[in-house]
Amino acid sequence: MDKSEMLLGSYSYAALCGVTLIIGWLAHWAYKWMNPSCNGRLPPGSMGFPIVGETFDFFRASPSIDMPGYYKKRMKRYETLFKTSLVGRPVVVSLDPEVNRFIFQQEGKLFQSWYPDTTMNIFGKKSITTYDRTVHKFIRSLTAKLLGPENLKESLLPELELSMRESFVSWIGKPSIEVKDGVSNMVFDLLSKKLISLDTTNSRELRNNFQEFFMGMVSFPIYFPGTLFYRCMKGRRNVHSALTNVMKVRLSAPEKKFGDLLDLIIDELRSEKPMIDENFAIDVLVILLFTSIATLSPTLTVAIKFLTDNPKIVEELKEEHETIMKKREGVNSGFTWEEYKSLKFTIQVMNEIGRISNVAPGIFRKTLTDVQVNGYTIPSGWLVMISPAAVHLNPELFEDPLKFDPWRWKEEKRSSLLRNYIPFGGGIRQCLAADFSKLFIALFLHILVTEYRWKEIGGGKIMRVSEILSPEDYHIQLVPRA
């Protein structure tokens, strides 16, 4: 064997050793991925393929209001608690009401509020993870001043009714209205005015940039032209730029007051030791504006679809609301807080809407330490995802769950059903806008059933992406009652 052959043999051997080491390392890495370490026994389940996990199965659209197949398949195999991996993160999914209550009760002790990386990239990682609980408590208190029960009762309700009536009037005479788009405008116009004092023209322009946000939240975070996540992040940049300009204008003339939430934020930013900075404030405004249209518009679209298919429910709603109107002192009296609180059947309808609609992609927490649940260990640093849809559509908890049945919420059954009812989350992190959302829906139904009739024009097919109920374009024609 000559020298060149010996060298070639040496190189080939070295290359073979290198390839063997790489394959061995990849095999070890894949094994570690599929069998994560744990100081105890992990819940059953599969981590899926490295990196992608079971993400694509989780995000697969389901053309039904039923519980997504992702959950059904795993409930059958693993029951109500299982491990998985979504968008590169290890996750334990809880479909168990008792476990869910335990998680909510242990907020700040064993668990902390958390969000998937996709959500943090969209809404600002700093605003979600960096600031401490004191700052978040401060922001919650600010928001409560606008959307809390006291302000709703004393100030916002008459303004909300006027704004909503104007929106309904604008629908009259049109061949058709796309419900989700119409409701989005209705709620966004009001909240953009109360948050940052935008007029209708600027409000609509800003709202258009939120269009891509929603689907971006339930997409794999691949930042490449043409992907949902890319379009989502482009919309985020536009929104951030618009709100930055608003912030600059307001900071340049802090003495000028508008009576909105931004007044309070500006005062804090100009204080001697502000608890927040401008970027954090803008991220908070983005979250508030986004959630206003991401929750109420699909929820009310689904509501109108179910009401259209159930005229008996519409008639009972109409009867209840006409009864409270007959008790008013004057014909021009508006909807009052006392009337709202007196509603019974309407609350049953609203509960049923909330049970079926499920517009959140899940409720996420992060373990602060190893947590023992049902004989299993959830390792420190893992995400835990609670699925409202899987609970609300479980036939063992809600009889005939796919049926839109407000009567299931009669007083004698309500308390037991409410134990498993989590449309707004639970514990100390319950959605800040819960009271506003409930009032908005009640007032919407009040005006709709007492003053208008509507006819279905087309669309309205409902599907779930992840567990989000997403109605396709749903067109109705609205006419005043004779």
Image (tube, helix red, strand yellow):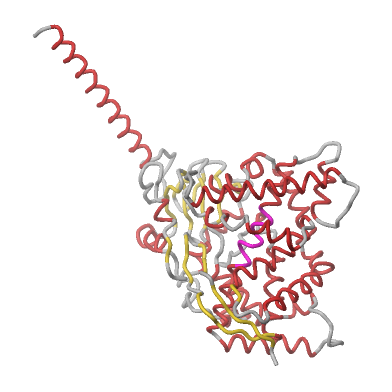
- Residue toward you, 107 or 159: 159
- Magenta-drawn stretch contains 316: no
Residue 283 position, x and y percent, is 68, 47
Residue 201 position, x and y percent, is 73, 61
Give the farthest residue toward the right: 255
State which quadrant residue 209 falls in: bottom right
Up the image or down, 21 lies above or below 10; here it is below
Residue 268 position, x and y percent, is 82, 44
Relative to 387, 183 lies left or right: right
* Residue 102 in view here: no
* Residue 39 in view here: yes
Residues in magenta, as a range: 287-297
- Magenta-drawn stretch contains 296: yes
Give the farthest residue toward the bottom: 482
Position of the C terminus, as image quadrant, is bottom right
Up the image or down, 31 lies above or below 302; here it is above
Name the chief secondary structure element in magenta. helix
